[in-house]
Amino acid sequence: MLSENIRRMRNERGLSQEELARRLHVVRQTISKWEQGLSVPDAQMLLRLAEELEVSVPMLLGEGNDSQEKREEAEQKTVQELAATLGKINDALAQQEEKRRKRWHILCLALLVILGLYTVYLAAGFFYSRHMMAMLQADQASIGIIGGSDGPTQILVAAGSVQGINVFLLAVLIGALVVGLIKTRRK
């Protein structure tokens, strides 16, 4: 295991046996014997070897988590954990968006009902004022008359002039609310 690790880690760092031997102040044959499993470095040399290969001694001895297979498993596990975390975040964002959509939908519905009732109120007032004007015209005795040199002048007072603008504005608001309801409906 140590011999395989020395060879693999040396190759991963792009070092030749000669280069590693020069850095450790040993001959190339020593490195070759370690990689063939014919000999092992002593404790002091093992520390220097791990330092040159930029790994820990347990990893060099194969006790660490430095094998290619273990690294790939760890990377795969990390990717899976990341995917699961991103899935949870995506679900949470979707739930927030659904709550926001429902709030807007309910608000649009409530405003539509309120404006609908107000429209009925205005229409009733409009028809009532028209009815009252018709009654006033039919009953001459209840109309105020101001005398003048050219004869009597009748004055009719009606509250229907502003209602036309109110009905138009209500129609625009109701149209906007209908569009809001369509945009916030569940797809």
Image (cartoon, rainbow, N blue to C red):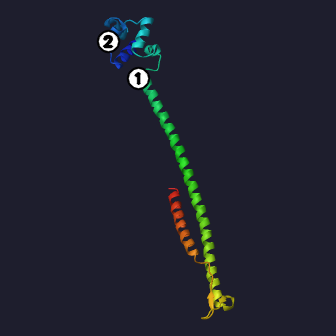
Q: What type is the residue that disc 1 sits on?
A: Gln
Q: Is residue 89 above or below residue 48?
A: below
The residue depicted at 50 percent of the width and 58 percent of the height is 183
Q: Which residue lies furthest to the right in this view?
A: 141
What percent of the width, then of the height, locates residue 167?
A: 56, 72
Q: Is mark 1 on a helix, strand or loop?
A: helix
The residue depicted at 43 percent of the width and 14 percent of the height is 60
What percent of the width, then of the height, locates residue 132?
A: 65, 83
What percent of the width, then of the height, locates residue 126?
A: 61, 78
Disc 1, disc 2: CB below 8 Å? Answer: no
Q: Residue 174 carries which label?
A: none
Which residue is at the front of the view, 104 or 68? 104
Classify mark 2: residues with Cα within 10 Å, few (<14), some (14-19) or many (20+): some
Q: Which mark is residue 68?
A: 1
Q: Is mark 2 on a helix, strand or loop?
A: helix
Q: Residue furthest front?
A: 149
Indicate left or right for 6 with 176 as reference. left
Q: Quadrant of residue 114?
A: bottom right
Q: What type is the residue that disc 2 sits on?
A: Glu
Q: Is residue 105 above or below residue 52?
A: below
The quadrant in which the N terminus is found is top left
What percent of the width, then of the height, locates residue 119?
A: 60, 71
Indicate left or right for 15 with 184 as reference. left
Measure the C-alpha gap from mark 1 to mark 2: 24 Å
Q: Nearer the viewer, mark 1 or mark 2?
A: 2
Which residue is at the front of the view, 108 or 78? 108
Classify mark 1: residues with Cα within 10 Å, few (<14), some (14-19) or many (20+): few
Indicate left or right for 141 with 81 as reference. right
Q: Which mark is residue 19?
A: 2
